[in-house]
Image (tube, rainbow, N blue to C red):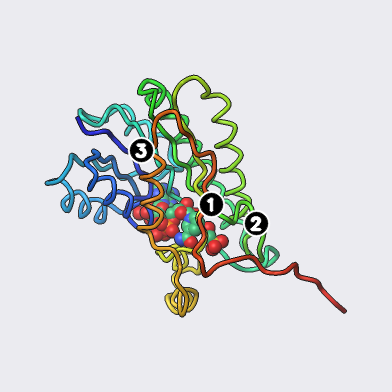
Amino acid sequence: MNKVVLITGATSGFGRAAALKFASEGWALVITGRREDRLQALQTELMETVPVFYKVLDVRNQDEINDLLNNLPEPFNDVACLINNAGLALSPKPAQETELADWHTMIDTNITGLVNMTHAFLPTLIKVGEGASIINVGSIAGQWPYPGSHVYGASKAFVQQFSYNLRCDLLGTGVRVTDLAPGIAETEFTLVRTGGDQAASDALYANTEALSAEDIANAMYYIATLPPHVCINRMEVMPTMQAWAPFAIHRE
Ligand code: NDP
Ligand code: 8X3
């Protein structure tokens, strides 16, 4: 029987690439996101290979999550891997120039949404037990500060600590938890972050080699298929072309 992976944010970037990767390895897919046309297209693309179930779902909406949980048909019930991937950054400007609503959107999606999904599917994952895993997509921004990261980076710091704390409570259940923290990766992330500025997005990825969505999907698959007694607590992945900068010093 196919193992089941549940992926949030499967309509683009890491989530879509993860769907393709897990499907290529024979996993059944539960794919979610807000854009139904993309979910439908992905289902159509993959359903001849593996069973695929899609649900239009905003991770901020607990009712939609409960609806998914309570209506998952066979053979999708025993979710063995939950990939909490849906997330976004907004307003890459100094904190004092941002809109409060953008901060709330990041908190509601990256923190509350991830918590909503985790809480709903913990009983299922615990029932599956040994070998089950939760992969929470954090970011290098959760560990390292940089200008314009404000609430986004802070939300990813939450993801790291929540992942570690979950490990404590899940000890003995067999369920593993990983904070997967990518660096710069070329997806629709920057298009969203800049409010649809394609030129700004293209400029960020120009003349360098960012991570690809497939790089992170491969990391997800690696984490999910390690022997059941092995748990990676945190995996930070940067492209070779990215590193840290010196501390900034303001001078009069
Ligand atoms: P994309 O913008 O390509 O994909 C983001 C996905 O999240 C989309 O499928 C989108 O689906 C989904 N999503 C956003 N908001 C919601 C919501 N409220 N409810 C449900 N789904 C939602 O970006 P990435 O693939 O790059 O981002 C995936 C994750 O990786 C995010 O958590 C991001 O913070 C993180 N990350 C990205 C990095 C990068 O450089 N690209 C680096 C480090 C971390 P839809 O719009 O259809 O709902
Ligand atoms: C975003 C990664 O490199 O833009 O999570 O901070 S980076």
Q: Position of residue 159 (x, y in %)?
A: 56, 43
Ligand 2 is within 8 Å of the C-beta of the residue at disc 2:
yes
Q: Position of residue 134 (x, y in %)?
A: 44, 36
Ligand 1 is within 8 Å of the C-beta of the residue at disc 1:
no
Element on which disc 2 rests: loop
Element on which disc 1 rests: strand
x 16%, y 51%: residue: 44
Instruction: Give the residue pinned by disc 2.
Output: 144
Using the image, determine if residue 37 lies above or below residue 131.
Answer: below
187 and 247: which is toward the camera = 247
Counting other residues with Cα less than 10 Å from the Cα at mark 1, is it few (<14), some (14-19), or many (20 or more)?
Answer: few
For residue 65, side relative to residue 100 (left or right): left
165 and 222: which is toward the camera = 222
When asked about the image quadrant of residue 160, the answer is: top right
First of labels 1, 2 by sequence position: 2
Using the image, determine if residue 48 lies above or below residue 211.
Answer: above
Element on which disc 3 rests: loop
When asked about the image quadrant of residue 31, the answer is: top left
Name the front one of labels 2 and 3: 3
When asked about the image quadrant of residue 90, the answer is: bottom right
Instruction: Give the residue pinned by disc 1.
Output: 236
Residue type at mark 3? Thr
Q: Position of residue 63 (x, y in %)?
A: 39, 34
Counting other residues with Cα less than 10 Å from the Cα at mark 3, is it few (<14), some (14-19), or many (20 or more)?
Answer: few
Residue type at mark 2? Trp
Residue type at mark 1? Glu
x 38%, y 50%: residue: 9
Which residue occupies the extreme left position in the image? 48
Instruction: Give the residue pinned by disc 3.
Output: 225
First of labels 1, 3 by sequence position: 3
